[in-house]
Image: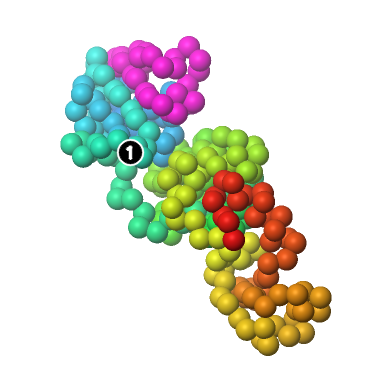
Amino acid sequence: MWVRVRVYAELNDFLPASRRQAAFDEVCADRTSVKDLLEGVGIPHTEVDLLLVNGESAAFDHRLADGDRVTAYPVFEALDVGGVTRVRPEPLREVRFVLDGHLGRLAAFLRLAGFDALYLRDAGDAELAAVSAAERRILLTRDQGLLKRRAVTHGYLVRSTRPTAQLTDVLQRFDLRRLVRPFTRCMRCNGLLAAVSKDEVAGQVPPRSYEAFDRFLRCQGCGKIYWQGSHYERLSRLVGPITGITE
């Protein structure tokens, strides 16, 4: 059988040039699900937020019939779609991420901006998918196939190879700029930072830094101590224009 497919906005990134920004016909097996159809043409289900079949809301497991018209939309940030049913599960109440082994720098930048970003450098696809599902974390990856795993319900394919551009993409994709809380997480282990008195860090930081600064933070996970030195300033200059960090 065949169905007619139309996708919008950034979902076109997953299609060959000849199929972008236009409706196209796709041949598929009888009673193919919408999820299998979309992933068969290259679109991970985690990128889709709204589905219509013949103009009516549909779920991923909807079985298609010959001649059906399938329309897919990405996540909406400002458009009111209250009259239709999104295919996503309920939004995550707390924005948390898990990142694959190719996105270590992005993980550090997300932590710098205050987001819970679990970085699993050596984890395989099955482990990443399982952690994403079990801990309700948004899976960030550059591996399109990983996002097609059924266990993954919230994910995003990171397009850029530049960490600062990756950070921009993620903040825009999930509308996160209003949630930025700079320097509240440890860039090394992802633990939360807590203020400590100057007396508490005596002998634990370089003497010059101890004399120059009065505000110190300690990671509640690994114990690393932070202060607003030259490293802090370099990071602020690097990601400040992206995140709005002005401290």
Q: Secondary structure at mark 1?
A: loop
- Coloring applied to the structure: rainbow
Q: Is residue 155 visible?
A: yes
The span picked out in magenta is 1-28
Query: Residue 242, percent across and down?
Result: 57, 46
Q: Quadrant of residue 214?
A: bottom right
Asked whether 2 falls inside the magenta stretch, the response is: yes
Q: Quadrant of the C terminus?
A: bottom right
- The relative height of residue 173 versus residue 53 in the rendered view (above or below) is below
Q: Is residue 105 left or right of residue 179?
A: right
Q: Is residue 126 visible?
A: no
- The relative height of residue 53 versus residue 231 in the rendered view (above or below) is above
Asked whether 7 falls inside the magenta stretch, the response is: yes
Identify the residue at image location x=21%, y=32%.
Answer: 57
Q: How dense is the environment of label 1, judged by Cα within 10 Å: few (below 14), some, or many (20 and up)? A: few
Identify the residue at image location x=30%, y=24%.
Answer: 71
Q: Is residue 122 left or right of residue 211?
A: left
Residue at mark 1: 78
Q: Amino acid at mark 1?
A: Ala
Q: Is residue 102 left or right of residue 155?
A: right
Identify the residue at image location x=45%, y=41%.
Answer: 173
Q: Which residue is more in the foreground, 190 or 218?
A: 218
Q: Which residue is more in the foreground, 71 or 243?
A: 243
Q: Is residue 99 left or right of residue 94?
A: right
Query: Residue 117, percent across and down?
Result: 54, 57
Q: Quadrant of the N terminus?
A: top left
Give the mark count. 1
Identify the residue at image location x=55%, y=66%.
Answer: 184
Query: Residue 68, percent across and down?
Result: 24, 18
Outermost residue toward the bottom in this view: 199
Query: Residue 96, percent across and down?
Result: 46, 56
